[in-house]
Amino acid sequence: AKRYAKALIATARTDAELDALARDLDAFALAVSESAELRDALLSPTVRATAKAGIIKEVAARLGTTAHVLRFVELVITAHRFDHFAAIVECFHDELDRRRGLVRGEVFAAQPIDAAGLARVKEVLAKALGKTVVLVKRRDETLIGGLQVRVGGVIIDGSLRGRIDRLVDQMRE
């Protein structure tokens, strides 16, 4: 999946083209994920390649997909790798983020986080990681209070629940 994603990124000449590729890939991936009939047709070995080409051209036309992404999806189908399409799209975004110096994560809180609080968390993480941080807010009432941040496979637990769990572990030792 990484090879396909990197190859697609390499074909773009500008940031605007990369943004268009991302938008169109996401739209196509969403269409496939929402339609079992479409997904089954594109994955089926009994559906001829010419029929699949017609199907994806029709979907691309409905979505307003660029010819660039249409050719890429055709390539993935021709190479019999469409079962990896979701992973290719995910790798595309990961590589694009890496090239742009972005890291994505989630911040969990028991109570809603205001804009100033979220900005402060982003600022601290950006300073520590040396990258621009994009965070998605999530509610998790089991945390009781405080925050839990997940970025790039790392969990930073500043929640009250986490503190209680650590105290219990210390008392057991």
Image (tube, rainbow, N blue to C red):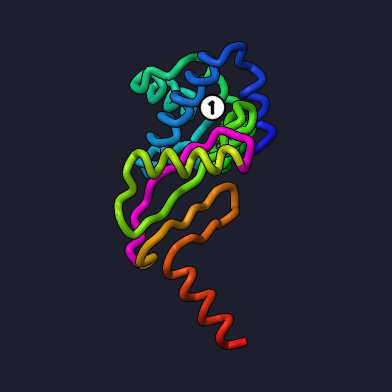
Q: Amino acid at mark 1?
A: Val
- Residue 146's place in the image compared with 103, above or below, is below
Residue 143 appears left or right of 4: left
- Identify the residue position indicated by label 1 in the image: 73
Residue placed most toward the observer, 27 or 98? 98
Q: Quadrant of residue 90?
A: top right
- Residue at left 56%, top 38%? 126
- Residue at left 35%, top 67%? 144
The residue range painted magenta reads 128-141
- Residue at left 62%, top 11%? 13
- Residue 148's place in the image compared with 42, above or below, is below
Farthest right residue?
Answer: 3
In what quadrant of the picture does the C terminus appear? bottom right
Where is residue 153? Give x, y as percent: 59, 52
Residue placed most toward the observer, 29 or 36? 29
Residue placed most toward the observer, 48 or 72? 72
